[in-house]
Image (cartoon, rainbow, N blue to C red):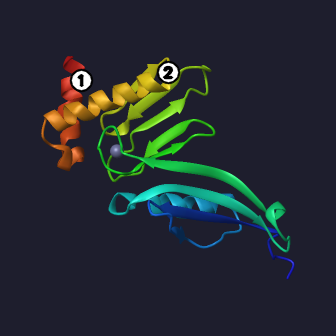
Amino acid sequence: MADTPSRVFVPTAVEADGKAIGMGCFSSEETAWQVLRTFLKKSELMNLKSASIVIWEIDIVGDDAMTVLSTIECKTCPVCKRNTFWLDLSQFSALCHGVSCAAWVEESTVEPGIIDCGWPAIQFLKQTSSIKEAFKELYKLGDRLTAAGQTEQIAGTAEGLLGEFQNS
Ligand SMILES: [Zn+2]
């Protein structure tokens, strides 16, 4: 059994009532993230509060066997208003996993202290000086979508909004 991994990566989602949803255990971090991300796409249909990936060492007893790799929290997306916006608080980044949204906020890798945010559907991209400002930008975008009364058809709205933004 030379191929037996010495550690496994375990993605878990936690519902609002505290119930954990297991997704299996995997021999690589990459696969664990893939499984978790696929699951999170459906998170608007569930009432989730957080999700995590934990590394478990094989054949080790007790707390030492376990390392929390990442914990993310579920929020309402500022743009599409669905329950699909996932925040990673340890290395600040946030991404909406909802279908045809993918709004995001992230600390700039090029300029420390600068917070980038964006919405791929209309190639919206903005640099701000704080996380709060970045969220404000996304909320503004979401409000315009709501005002347009087309939040149910975000993808279809994208082109019209793009024109609107270019003109403003
Ligand atoms: Zn969204």
Q: Position of residue 31 (x, y in %)?
A: 62, 63
Q: Position of residue 95 (x, y in %)?
A: 46, 43
In-front residue for pair 56/95: 56
| Residue lying at the far bottom of the rendered structure | 1
- 127 vs 152, left or right, is right
Which residue carries the number 2 mark? 130
Alpha carbons under labels 1 and 2: distance apart: 22 Å
Circle 1 — which element?
helix
The answer to whether residue 112 is above or below residue 35 is: above
Residue at horizontal 82 percent and vertical 68 percent from the top: 62
- 32 vs 132, left or right, is right
Circle 2 — which element?
loop
Which kind of residue does numbered mark 1 sit on?
Phe
| Residue lying at the far front of the rendered structure | 17
Q: Position of residue 51 (x, y in %)?
A: 54, 57
Which kind of residue does numbered mark 2 sit on?
Ser
- 69 vs 137, left or right, is right
Q: Are marks 1 and 2 in contact (CB under 8 Å)?
A: no
- State the image quarter where residue 107 is shown: top right
Which residue carries the number 1 mark? 165
**Dot 2 beta carbon under 8 Å from ligand 1:** no
Ligand 1 shows up in the quarter that is: top left
The quadrant in which the N terminus is found is bottom right
The quadrant in which the C terminus is found is top left
- State the image quarter where residue 114 is shown: top right
Q: Position of residue 113 (x, y in %)?
A: 59, 20
Mark whose residue sits in front, 1 or 2: 2
